[in-house]
Image: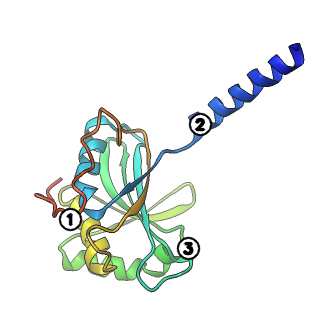
């Protein structure tokens, strides 16, 4: 009986340890981006992030997925185009040019041997939303995968992500 009890305790401890290390995943839409940014701003700290991934139309391979990220670094909230997945690397110049047509400048940066493009300041939601909706032609109500770390989302502390399918009231977040 003692062996079974110890095994049970170890199993529960293992499950709790594993659950505490898993980054939460959520289903969102492009129109949720202003609310996501707002929650990052209100409840996030340095190293908090939201990674939003999707597969562009006509792509069948999960290796062709695109990822945009919003993160807080040194107290500044920003948009990141992380150059780690093949599609983001391949579309780097296309995204730089698209951002420029919107009047935005993406700065090349590197951290932990990972290159990325970053923009801080105003209109963060506009850039990410327009990349998804206009550049990649993803419908506004399409479900996107979001992993979130270090901020409240999908809990009683966060506003309901029920804005799906509705156009953002303001991109100025």
Disc 3 and disc 2: Cα gap in Å?
25 Å
Image side of residue 165 versus residue 5, left or right? left
Mark linked to residue 19: 2
Disc 1 and disc 2: Cα gap in Å?
34 Å
For residue 37, above or below residue 115:
above
In the image, farthest residue toward the front: 1
Mark 1 and mark 2 residues within 8 Å of each other at the beta carbon: no
Image side of residue 128 versus residue 114, left or right? left
**Mark 2, other Cα within 10 Å: few <14 / some 14–19 / many ≥20:** few
Q: Nearer the viewer, residue 128 or 156?
A: 156
In the image, farthest residue toward the bottom: 58
Q: Nearer the viewer, residue 1 or 137?
A: 1
Q: Nearer the viewer, residue 167 or 127?
A: 167
For residue 107, above or below residue 41:
below
Mark 1 or mark 3: name the one nearer the start of the chain.
3
Which quadrant of the rendered structure holds the N terminus? top right
Mark 3 or mark 2: name the one nearer the start of the chain.
2
- Residue assigned mark 3: 62
SS for tag 2?
helix
Give residue 134's quadrant in the image: bottom left
Q: Nearer the viewer, mark 1 or mark 2?
A: 2
In percent of width and height, residue 35 lies at 24, 49
SS for tag 1?
helix
Q: Nearer the viewer, residue 42 or 133?
A: 133
For residue 48, above or below residue 5:
below
Task: Please give the name of the residue rendered at 20% of the width and 65% of the height, measured from the top-left corner.
Answer: 126
SS for tag 3?
helix
Image side of residue 166 versus residue 99, left or right? left
Q: Nearer the viewer, mark 1 or mark 3?
A: 3
Disc 1 and disc 3: Cα gap in Å?
26 Å
Mark linked to residue 126: 1
In percent of width and height, residue 70 lies at 35, 54
């Amino acid at each position: 009986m003692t062996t079974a009890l110890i095994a049970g305790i170890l199993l529960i401890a293992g499950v709790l340890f594993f659950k505490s290390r898993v980054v939460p995943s959520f289903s969102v839409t492009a129109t949720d981006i202003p609310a996501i940014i707002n929650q990052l701003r209100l409840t996030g700290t340095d190293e908090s992030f939201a990674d939003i991934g999707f597969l562009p139309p006509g792509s069948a391979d999960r290796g062709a997925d695109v990822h945009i990220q919003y993160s807080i670094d040194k107290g500044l909230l920003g948009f990141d185009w992380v150059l780690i997945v093949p599609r983001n690397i391949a579309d780097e110049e296309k995204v730089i040019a698209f951002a420029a047509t919107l009047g935005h400048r993406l700065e090349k940066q590197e951290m932990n041997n990972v290159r990325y493009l970053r923009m801080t300041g105003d209109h963060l939601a506009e850039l990410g939303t327009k990349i998804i909706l206009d550049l990649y032609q993803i419908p506004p109500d399409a479900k996107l995968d979001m992993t979130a770390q270090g901020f409240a989302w999908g809990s009683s502390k966060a506003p309901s992500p029920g804005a799906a399918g509705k156009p953002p009231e303001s991109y100025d977040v």
